[in-house]
């Protein structure tokens, strides 16, 4: 991956994280973390991976973010001084799902020992 793409990924992750934190009304019992951004080589598209806790609320949060993606894109376009600005798409972090599954298994084993 080129240095430019890495810098663009980092910049989008930082700016989008600030925008979501300040401007999106998410339920209070949900934690959303932007884990990584993968931008295409031509800078046309960017996948934004998010981790959501608790994981059973993931579909709800993805629906909220995807509903507001146009406004987020518009705000991102105003903040960044680069062209083109990649079109963002939110994706749930797969490692988060696997970690939640493993945590559930460990919790079950812990309860069996008691």
Image (tube, helix red, strand yellow):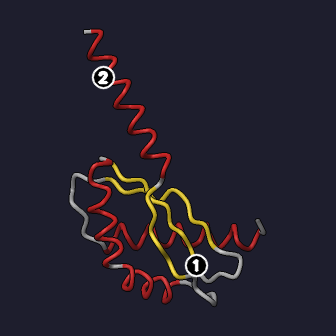
Q: Quadrant of residue 28?
A: bottom left
Q: Quadrant of residue 99?
A: top left
Where is residue 57? Give x, y as percent: 27, 54
Query: Residue 10 bears which disc, if any?
Result: none
Distance between the alpha carbons at the discs numbered 1 and 2: 41 Å
Around disc 1, counting alpha carbons within 10 Å, would you say few (fewer than 14), some (14 to 19), or many (20 or more)? some
- Quick check: 2 above or below 50? below
Residue at image point 32% right, 24% down: 107
| Residue farthest to the top, as pictured | 114
Residue at which label 1 appears: 45
Secondary structure of the residue carrying tag 1 is strand
Q: Left or right: 97 with respect to 61?
A: right
Q: Left or right: 62 with respect to 43?
A: left
Secondary structure of the residue carrying tag 2 is helix
Residue at image point 21% right, 60% down: 27
Q: Which of 103 and 24 is in front in this view?
A: 103
The count of marks equals 2
Q: Tell me the quadrant of the picture where the N terminus can be found.
A: bottom right
Q: In which quarter of the image is residue 26?
A: bottom left
First-in-chain label (1 vs 2): 1
- Quick check: 104 above or below 68? above
- Quick check: 44 above or below 20? below
Where is residue 30? Give x, y as percent: 27, 53
| Residue farthest to the right, as pictured | 2
Residue at image point 43% right, 85% down: 75
Residue at which label 2 appears: 108
Where is residue 94? Give x, y as percent: 48, 50
Where is residue 53? Give x, y as percent: 33, 48
């Amino acid at each position: 991956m080129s240095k430019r793409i890495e810098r663009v990924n980092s910049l989008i992750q930082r700016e989008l994280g600030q925008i979501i934190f300040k401007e999106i009304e998410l339920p209070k019992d949900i934690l959303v973390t932007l884990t990584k951004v993968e931008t295409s080589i031509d800078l046309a598209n960017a996948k934004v991976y998010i981790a959501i806790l608790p994981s059973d609320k993931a579909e709800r949060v993805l629906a909220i973010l995807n509903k507001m993606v146009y406004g987020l894109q518009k705000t991102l376009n105003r903040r960044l001084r680069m062209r083109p600005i990649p079109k963002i798409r939110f994706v749930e972090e797969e490692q988060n799902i696997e970690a939640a599954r493993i945590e559930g298994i460990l919790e079950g084993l812990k309860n069996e020992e008691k």
